[in-house]
Every structure is written in C-alpha cells, then in structure tokens.
Image: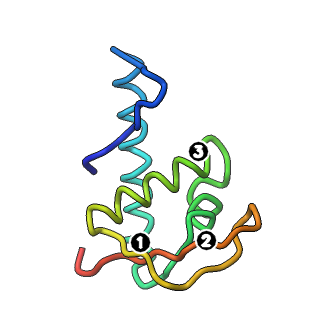
C-alpha cells in the first residue's frame, strides 16, 4: 500500500512513523481479508464487523484502507449499495482478480 496515515494532525518523528505503520498494517489486513473471501463483495461496515469486530480499529480507518486499495486497483467499487451502520448508503467493494 502506498499511503498509510493521512497526517491531518501534524504528527512528527516516532509518532508519525508509528501511525503510518499501523495504517499500513490495517490496509494489509483488509486486503488479505478480501483475498481470503475472494468472490465476496463487502462494505466497509462488513469488513469492520467481520475482520476487526468493531474493536480497536475505527470504521474510518477501514474506509481509508479500502479507498487506498481501490486507488491502487486492488479493489473495485461496485454500483451496489446497502444501508450502513449510520443509516447512510454504503458501497460494496470487490477484489480485483487476479491478485
């Protein structure tokens, strides 16, 4: 993944390095999750619920990871949506094959 942490809070030094590394690990986990579920399309809420169990990883971080993976052409956004956990439509994403 090319982009990790979006430094909107002006972190620097070790704090920025740690935040970037954590974001990259989350992205790798999301990508591996899509690969393990190859033909399944999922929303960010689906991934947050199934992979991270809505625990220590905020849904916004899952959305960031999915957006980065889509920008890298590893995932593709479909036209299909469903109501997300906040009552707004969420797009489904699918793995770009072959990976």
Task: Compute the Cα span from label 3 to label 1.
Answer: 20 Å
Q: Of helix, strand and loop, which one carries label 3?
A: loop
| Residue bearing mark 2 | 90
Q: Residue at x 26, y 62 (%)?
A: 72
Q: Residue at x 43, y 75 (%)?
A: 77
Q: Residue at x 44, y 47 (%)?
A: 26
Which of the pair 56/62 is nearer the observer? Answer: 62
Task: Compute the Cα span from label 2 to label 3.
Answer: 18 Å
Q: Contact (CB < 8 A) between labels 2 and 3?
A: no
Which of the pair 7/36 is nearer the observer? Answer: 7
**Which of marks 1 and 3 precedes in the sequence?**
1
Q: Is 19 located above or below residue 28 in the figure?
A: above
Please tell me whether mark 2 or mark 3 is closer to you in this view: 2
Q: Of helix, strand and loop, which one carries label 1?
A: helix
Please tell me whether mark 3 or mark 1 is closer to you in this view: 3
Residue 58 place in picture, x, y as percent: 61, 45
| Residue bearing mark 3 | 57
| Residue bearing mark 1 | 36
């Amino acid at each position: 993944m090319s982009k990790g942490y979006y430094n909107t809070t002006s972190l620097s030094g070790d704090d920025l390095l740690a935040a970037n590394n954590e974001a990259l690990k989350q992205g790798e986990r999301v990508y591996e999750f899509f690969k393990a579920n190859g033909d399944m399309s999922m929303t960010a809420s689906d991934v947050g619920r199934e992979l991270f169990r809505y625990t220590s990883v905020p849904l916004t971080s899952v959305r960031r990871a999915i957006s980065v993976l889509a920008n890298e052409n590893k995932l593709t956004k479909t036209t299909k949506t469903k109501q997300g956990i906040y009552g707004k439509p969420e797009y489904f994403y699918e793995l770009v094959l072959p990976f």
